[in-house]
């Protein structure tokens, strides 16, 4: 399963994958962080299409074309704002990964790249968010033949190292489970 997962460092707007995921807000009309970068790189037609969608609740996902991006599609998902962890944040963040991947399957998307949703402006602790991203993705890939490849795009060393460490940890745990079966 983990052979279908890549961890890279860099700018998600540069990736020539079928779909990149945007860490949006519920208006879907743009913002700062990766959302701002995606809208700038895609050009003004992206916000025009987003305007027709009528927003998106936290944890859900919507799809648009990618316009000037190398990626064909943008999957917009809305992560939770971190508020200490007692307000369903973990479940909402897990839903972002599940719903984005389900939309990818529906559209026949083979290659998809995720930023570290909620870990910037929305303040989610990086290790906790990374654990959820990896757990949900491994679980989804175990049950679906597509997407063929999921890339986690890390902006900065801290996020990159968290993904590497936690993916290795998840692989060890899966290996131990397999051996005991
Ligand atoms: N490529 C990859 N990752 C990036 C890029 C990029 N070009 N730019 C930033 N990141 P954030 P959130 C990383 O703040 O926390 C917006 O205003 C960043 O370092 O973009 O979900 C929206 O409209 C961090 O690790 O998203 C919402 O209002 C991760 O992407 C709000 O921010 C997510 O950081 C969403 O906040």
Image (tube, rainbow, N blue to C red):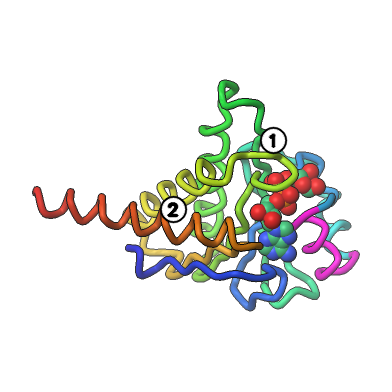
Q: Does the magenta stretch include residue 114?
A: no
Start and end of the magenta stretch? 33-44
| x 66%, y 27%: residue | 83
Q: Mark 1 points at which residue?
A: 57
- Is 78 above or below relative to 15? above
Residue 114 at x, y percent in the picture = 59, 59
Q: Which mark is residue 137?
A: 2
- Is 6 above or below relative to 114? below
Q: Indicate the quadrant where residue 157 lies.
A: bottom right
Q: Does the magenta stretch include residue 35?
A: yes
Majority secondary structure of magenta residues: helix
The Cα–Cα distance between marks 1 and 2, rounded to whole angstroms, is 21 Å
| x 70%, y 75%: residue | 14
Asked if labels 2 and 1 touch by Cβ distance under 8 angstroms, the answer is no
Q: Can residue 53 be seen in this view?
A: no
| x 75%, y 74%: residue | 69
Q: Of helix, strand and loop, which one carries label 2?
A: helix
Horizontal side of 178 relative to 81 (left or right) equals left
Which label lies toward us, 1 or 2?
2
């Amino acid at each position: 399963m983990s052979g279908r997962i890549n961890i890279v460092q860099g700018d998600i707007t540069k990736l020539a994958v079928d779909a990149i995921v945007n860490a949006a807000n519920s208006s879907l009309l743009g913002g700062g962080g990766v959302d701002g970068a995606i809208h700038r790189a895609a050009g003004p037609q992206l916000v025009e299409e987003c305007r027709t969608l009528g927003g998106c609740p936290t944890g859900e996902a919507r799809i648009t074309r990618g316009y000037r991006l190398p990626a064909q599609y943008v999957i917009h998902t809305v992560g939770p704002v971190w508020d200490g962890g007692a307000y369903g944040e973990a479940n909402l963040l897990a839903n972002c990964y599940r719903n984005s991947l389900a939309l990818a399957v529906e559209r026949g998307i083979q290659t998809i790249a995720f930023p570290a949703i909620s870990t910037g402006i929305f303040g989610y602790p990086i290790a906790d968010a990374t654990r959820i991203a990896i757990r949900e993705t491994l679980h989804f890939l175990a049950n679906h033949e597509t997407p063929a490849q999921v890339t986690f795009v890390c902006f900065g060393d801290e996020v990159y190292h968290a993904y590497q460490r936690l993916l290795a940890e998840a692989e060890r745990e899966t290996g131990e489970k397999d051996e005991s079966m």
